[in-house]
């Protein structure tokens, strides 16, 4: 069974197109998300005037909050993606998602190219 892990950029694209109902049909109850992605969506909903992004909470449910060991693994992933000058939250959502995939031992993953590269390097 497929599990959908969104990022905030993908969710904002659906919200811009006023297509959150379509996203909900695609996910069909098989979604989950990281706490950082949920917080990013809340922030973007206000910052970008995209109230439709708040529907993401209904679509993806309660976010996954990392425990202390998972937080350390998240920071290791985040450091891999960082560039000089990146803020402390840059790549945090992606890093939490990758940590969740690691913890679940998922190996068949479709994702953006930079994450495919990271998975191959492991």
Image (cartoon, rainbow, N blue to C red):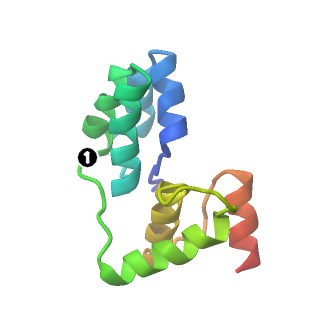
Is residue 30 visible to us here?
A: no
Relative to 71, is 52 above or below? above
In this rendering, position of residue 55 left or right of residue 81: left
Outermost residue on the bottom side: it is: 69
Outermost residue on the top side: it is: 18
Relative to 18, is 117 above or below? below
What is the x, y in percent for residue 24? 37, 31
What is the x, y in percent for residue 63? 29, 54
Query: Dot 1 lies on which element?
Result: loop
In this rendering, position of residue 13 left or right of residue 48: right
Taking the spot 32% from the left edge, 21% from the top edge, the residue there is: 51
Relative to 3, is 101 above or below? below
Viewer-closest of 69 and 5: 69
Viewer-closest of 20 and 73: 73
Taking the spot 40% from the left edge, 24% from the top edge, the residue there is: 20
Which quarter shows the C terminus? bottom right
Is residue 6 visible to us here?
A: yes
Q: How many marks?
A: 1
Q: Within 10 angstroms of label 1, few (less than 14), some, or many (20 or more) residues?
A: some
What is the x, y in percent for residue 107? 59, 71
In this rendering, position of residue 43 left or right of residue 117: left
Relative to 59, is 95 above or below? below
In this rendering, position of residue 83 left or right of residue 48: right
Residue identified by numbered label 1: 61
Within the image, what quadrant is residue 41 found in? top left
What is the x, y in percent for residue 44? 41, 33
Taking the spot 32% from the left edge, 37% from the top edge, the residue there is: 42
Which quarter shows the N terminus? bottom left
Outermost residue on the front side: it is: 85
């Amino acid at each position: 069974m497929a599990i959908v892990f969104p990022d905030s950029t993908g969710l904002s694209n659906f919200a811009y197109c006023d297509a959150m109902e379509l996203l909900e049909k695609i996910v069909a109850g098989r979604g989950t998300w990281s706490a950082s992605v949920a917080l990013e969506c809340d922030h973007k909903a206000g910052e970008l005037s995209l109230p439709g992004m708040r529907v993401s909470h209904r679509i993806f449910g309660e976010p996954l909050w990392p425990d202390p060991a998972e937080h350390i693994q998240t920071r290791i992933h985040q450091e891999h993606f960082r560039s000089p000058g990146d803020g402390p939250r840059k790549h945090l959502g992606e890093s939490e998602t990758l940590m969740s995939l690691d913890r679940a031992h998922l190996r068949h993953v479709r994702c953006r190219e930079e994450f495919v590269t990271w998975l191959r390097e492991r």
